Image (spheres, rainbow, N blue to C red):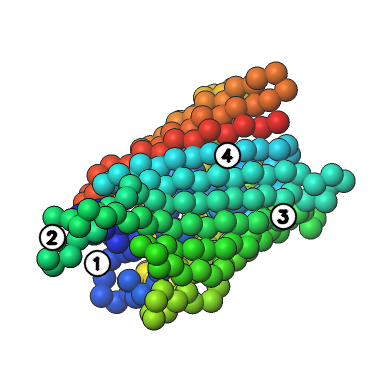
């Protein structure tokens, strides 16, 4: 039961303390769990920073910045042995016809024992539960500075032989202003019809996002990116996040971020390594997030470009 309670809390995060917001009124909130350690290390102020396969999740409008085939695999350790897996693959279309991508998100845990009032310690049977989303994305430049993208997702919530299925869409844009290195990005995520689980229907966690990013330092081997993002979720108050990413020789990265109006988290930290393997490129990223009420979380990803 402890695992079920923690899973329920995770599915409602970000959640919570204000009676003036519609907390707990949406479902499938696993769609809001950050999947990229690079983004999470920056406090998820990533909307106008995304330039890799993780753009499929954060801003499909920025997926057009991917200039080679990329595979991204990430893993997140949540409390009570709950885990989140994310896979994304992006590929430029020949003839400068844009970039396509596919993705899959899976939130899962170990099998749990079936208990009843007559068998509180278990019946000897077990059951499983998971939440899953599979997406297909497309993005392209409409001008030399402005790009647009969309992701369509199939969603499934499954628990003990009962499931709910549906679909949602993410739409995003990315604009390189031409003023120094300023980028502006916007995205609407998780837009779609209500899901029905058994007899209860609930809306998806729609989110409206706006982000900015600029490189105040880009000289020699040093590059520093500063980013800001704001969001208006359908089930909570407006939220803000800021983050920084420092690269040395485009090989070693350090990251930090700070979230505002998030009830259970604020600071985040991370780092990354990039290297070339012949004609291929590899990237390893890590993020650490301390939580006030839950266990701290760790995220790790492997990216391959070819």
Relative depth, front residue between 222 and 185:
185
Which of the marked residues, 2 or 4, is nearer the chain's N terminus? Answer: 4
Residue 203, image x, y percentages: 45, 75
In which quadrant of the rendered view does residue 119 lie? bottom left
Q: Are marks 2 and 4 in contact (CB under 8 Å)?
A: no
Residue 64 visible from this viewpoint: yes
Residue on which disc 1 sits:
17
In which quadrant of the rendered view does residue 261 lie? bottom left
Relative depth, front residue between 231 and 92:
92
Which of the marked residues, 3 or 2, is nearer the chain's N terminus? Answer: 2
Front disc: 4 or 1: 4
Residue on which disc 4 sits:
72
Q: Which element is circle 3 on? A: strand
Q: Is residue 298 left or right of residue 255?
A: left
Residue on which disc 2 sits:
120
Residue on which disc 3 sits:
139
Q: Residue at x 49, y 77 (%)?
A: 194
């Amino acid at each position: 039961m402890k695992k079920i309670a923690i899973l329920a809390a995770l599915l409602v995060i970000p959640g919570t303390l204000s009676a003036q917001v519609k907390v707990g009124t949406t479902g499938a909130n696993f769609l809001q769990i950050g999947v990229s350690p690079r983004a999470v290390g920056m406090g998820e102020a990533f909307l106008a920073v995304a330039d890799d396969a993780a753009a499929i999740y954060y801003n499909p409008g920025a997926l057009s910045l991917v200039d080679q085939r990329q595979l991204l695999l990430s893993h997140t350790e949540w409390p009570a042995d709950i885990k989140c897996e994310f896979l994304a693959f992006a590929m430029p279309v020949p003839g400068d016809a844009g970039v396509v991508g596919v993705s899959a998100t899976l939130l899962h845990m170990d099998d749990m024992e079936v208990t009843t009032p007559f068998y509180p310690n278990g019946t000897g049977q077990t059951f499983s539960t998971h939440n899953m989303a599979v997406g297909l994305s497309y993005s392209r430049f409409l001008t030399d500075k402005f790009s647009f993208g969309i992701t369509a997702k199939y969603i499934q919530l499954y628990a003990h032989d009962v499931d709910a299925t549906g679909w949602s869409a993410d739409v995003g844009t990315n604009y390189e202003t031409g003023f120094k290195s300023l980028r502006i990005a916007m995205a609407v995520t998780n837009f779609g019809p209500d899901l029905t689980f058994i007899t209860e229907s609930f809306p998806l966690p729609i989110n409206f996002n706006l982000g900015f990013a600029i490189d105040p330092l880009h000289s020699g081997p040093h590059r520093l990116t500063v980013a800001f993002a704001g969001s208006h979720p359908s089930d909570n108050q407006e939220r803000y996040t800021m983050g920084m990413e420092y690269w040395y020789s485009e090989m070693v990265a350090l990251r930090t971020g700070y979230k505002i109006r998030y009830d259970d988290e604020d600071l985040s930290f991370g780092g990354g390594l990039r290297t070339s393997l012949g004609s291929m490129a590899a990237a390893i990223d890590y993020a650490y997030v301390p939580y006030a009420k839950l266990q701290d979380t760790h995220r790790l990803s492997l990216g391959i470009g070819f």
